[in-house]
Image (tube, rainbow, N blue to C red):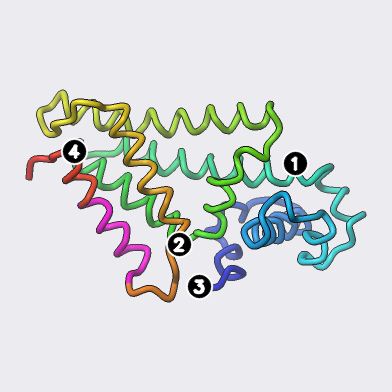
Amino acid sequence: MSAAEEMTGEDTPWAEVTPDAARRLLVAAVEAFAERGYQATTTRDIAGRAGMSPAALYIHYKTKEELLHRISRIGHDKALEILEAAANGPGTAAERLADAVRSFVRWHAGRRTTARVVQYELDALSAEHRAEIVELRRKSDAAVRRIINEGVAAGEFDVPDVPGTTLAVLSLCIDVARWFSTEGRRTPDEVGALYADLVLRMVSARK
C-alpha cells in the first residue's frame, strides 16, 4: 500500500472529515510531515500537495499547528478506540491483551505514515494542544494497564511492575510505525499476531 492509498478510503481516520477540501489538506499534511518533518514543512508545501493555494488552506485551518493538532487528535482518538474496545471486550485478560496488541500493531503497520506523524510529532504542538493529546495518551495507557491489572488479579499474569510493563507494551506497538515496510516479508496482520504472542510471553500469560 502506497502512502497515498494508505491515507484515502473509507477506513482512514479522517474518512468522515468534511468538507472534501479539509480532508484533502489533512491527507497532504500527513504526507508532508511524514516525509519532511513538521518543522521543515510549510503551508505552501501542504497546499501544493492538496492541489490548492496557500490562501485556500487558511479557509479550513488557521495555522500549520492547527493542522497537526487535528491530525493528532483524530489519530489518538482512534488509538484509544482500539484499546478500549479490547479492554472492554469479552474473554480472559490474556485474550483481551492479545486482541489489544494485535489491533494496535495492525493499525500502526497498516497506517504507518499517519501513525508516525501522530506518535512522533507531539512536541510540535502548542502547550494547550499537547496537554489535550497527553490526556488521551493517559487514557490509552489506562486501558492497557487495566487489562494487565485484571490479569494479575486473576492469576493469569505474573507482572511485578504493571506501570512499567504497560509502557513497554505500548512502546513496542507504537514503534512498529517507525520500521514497518510493505516490502517486508510480514503483513500488518502477521506482525500483529507476532507481537501479541511476544507480549503474552512478556507478562508470563498462562496457556
Measured in 3D between alpha carbons, the distance from the residue under mark 4 to the one under mark 1, in whole angstroms, is 39 Å
Distance from Cα at disc 2 to Cα at disc 4: 26 Å
Q: Position of residue 183 (x, y in %)?
A: 43, 76
* Tag shown at residue 203: 4
Tell whether label 1 touches label 3 (CB within 8 Å).
Answer: no
Q: Position of residue 129 (x, y in %)?
A: 67, 31
For label 3, the residue is 1
Residue type pointed to by label 4: Val
**Residue 110, numbered label:** 2
On screen, residue 190 versus residue 111, left or right, reads left
| Amino acid type at image mark 2 | Gly
- The earlier-in-sequence mark between 3 and 2 is 3
Type of secondary structure dominating the magenta stretch:
helix
Identified at 13% across, 40% down, the residue is: 205
Instruction: Identify the image quadrant of residue 90.
Output: top left
Residue 83: image location, x then y, percent: 39, 40
**Residue 96 within the magenta-colored segment of the rendering:** no
Residue sitting nearer the eye, 161 or 197: 161
Report the amino acid beneath label 1: Glu
Judged left or right of residue 100, residue 11 is right
Does the magenta portion include 187?
Answer: yes
Regarding mark 3 in the picture, which secondary structure is present there?
Answer: loop
Q: Is residue 29 left or right of residue 9?
A: right
Mark count: 4
Instruction: Tell me how far mark 4 sits from mark 3, CA to CA.
Output: 33 Å
Residue 66 is labelled as 1
